[in-house]
Image (cartoon, coloured by chain):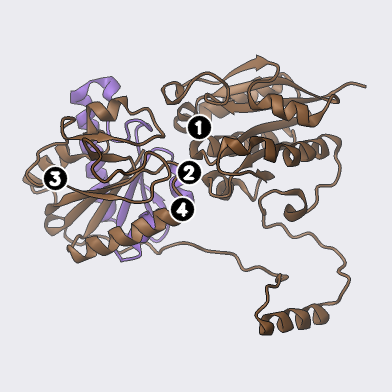
Amino acid sequence: MVKGIERYGLPVVHMATVVPISLTIGANRIIPGVGIPYPLGDPTQGEVDSKKIRKSMVRRALKALQTPVEEQTVFE
Amino acid sequence: MAKYKIVHYLNQFFGGIGGEDKADYKPAIQEGKVGPGLALSAALGEDYEIVATVICGDNYFGENLDEATDAIIEMVKGYAPDVFVAGPAFNAGRYGVACGTICKAVEERLGIPVITAEYEENPGVDMFRKDLIIVKTGDSAATLRKSMPNLAALVKKLATGAEVLGPEEEGYHERGIRVNYFAEERGSERAIQMLVKKMKGEEFDTDLPMPKFDRVDPAAPIADITKAKIALVTSGGIVPQGNPDHIESSNATKFGVYSIEGMDEMSPDDFTTIHGGYDRQFVMKNPNLVIPLDVMREMEKDGEFGELANYFCSTTGTGTATGSAAKFGDAIGKKLVENHVDGVILVST
């Protein structure tokens, strides 16, 4: 899906927990998710902190979309 | 004669621990064979014994690659097996990646021959085909018995050091390895035969298959984020309550487009997930964990980016054929471009 969209020239940031899979399928901008059942946030830390984590991850995603990349890049 | 010793790796499901709710199960080893180990043991015969079985949850492995690998290596070491077998993982993606990762580590660190078995679309195949022998299986556990003879035959060859033939003869996934041999006909004769077949429109086997590169060049970055329109896409199976488009919980054949116009967050009253490949309890309680609408609305108001597209696109990414996923991507990309979207956040569970 990532490649299908990016073929149209749109930058895609893939937020995924299992980064090796994301690399294999060919995503160019990757942000590691927190966990498979909760990629954006961590409900085990309570809703307030979970949301903070989510916000900082989305900020990182926007930054990745503004970053030129030559090859597959994981934004830690 | 002493029996050849096998250590077998299984995930929580095949190891009989439980389903997705037990996917965070930490690695543990037990004596003897478990689940698919019974069929493997029967296929291997009495000169072989599965001395122990390692069981680890797929999520635990995927989220703790290094810790899980280290722990399992220590467990396997104690048994000093002749061969380490993982799976079969069929089309289970996280399981397939775990099988490949642990096999590679056991071979590299312990010097023990390893083998696993997976369906061709399992992401583990492309990740590890160059490193490992991965026996071909069907896409579900229903093909377990069918895949056992090939797997058992190769386990025996690895244990005894017999020559492993090419992927077609032995039934494993092509590894991209070239082995020198003397052909019966010289190159010029083979070339003429191929040319004649090609001219007749017949199938022919090339001596030198071209590698398939399915890569897309990275798109140019967004120049001015404050004016950019961002769209959310997911493979996490988020749908409106009632799943109006009947998107499948596994092996999806379609995706949905759902409005988020006027909403400040993803309410669990409006949305749920139908994904059949992860423990859904957290996301059902708070769908923002996959579609981060709550924080994106705040950031949109604060001017951190231009605007959010007023819909998101969603499908289920478990057991879904790569061909289907490519089609969804193409259709979604087309729609987003028509709607003047500048960048995409795609969340996978």
Q: In the rendered image, which residue does mark 2 sit on? A: A20
Looking at the image, how many numbered discs can be counted on the residues?
4
Q: What residue would you read off at disc 3?
A: B260
Q: Quadrant of the C terminus of chain B?
A: top left
Is disc 2 on the same chain as disc 4? no
**Which residue is at 89% across, 21% downward?**
B2
Q: Is residue B295 above or below residue B195?
A: above
The reply to whether residue B71 is in sight is no
- What is the x, y in percent for residue B210? 62, 68
Which label sits in the foreground, 4 or 1? 4
Instruction: Choose mark 2 or mark 3, whichever is in front.
Output: 3
Residue occupied by mark 1: B65
| Alpha-carbon span between mark 3 and mark 1 | 36 Å
Q: Amino acid at mark 1?
A: Leu
Chain letter for the brown part: B
Q: In the displayed structure, would residue B267 be above or below residue B218?
A: above
* Alpha carbons under labels 1 and 2: distance apart: 10 Å
Q: Are marks 1 and 2 in contact (CB under 8 Å)?
A: yes
Q: Earlier in the sequence, mark 3 or mark 1?
A: 1
Identify residue type, mark 3: Ile
* First reached walking from the N terminus: tag 4 or tag 3: 3
Q: Where is residue A5 shown, x and y percent of the image?
A: 32, 59
In-image side of A15 versus B123 (left or right)? left
CA separation, marks 4 and 2?
Answer: 16 Å
Q: Nearer the viewer, residue B309 or B103?
A: B309
Tag 4 residue: B322
Q: Position of residue B43 (x, y in %)?
A: 77, 31
**Image point 6% across, 44% down: which residue?**
B262
The quadrant of the image that shows the N terminus of chain B is top right
Which element type, helix, strand or loop, lies under badge 2? helix
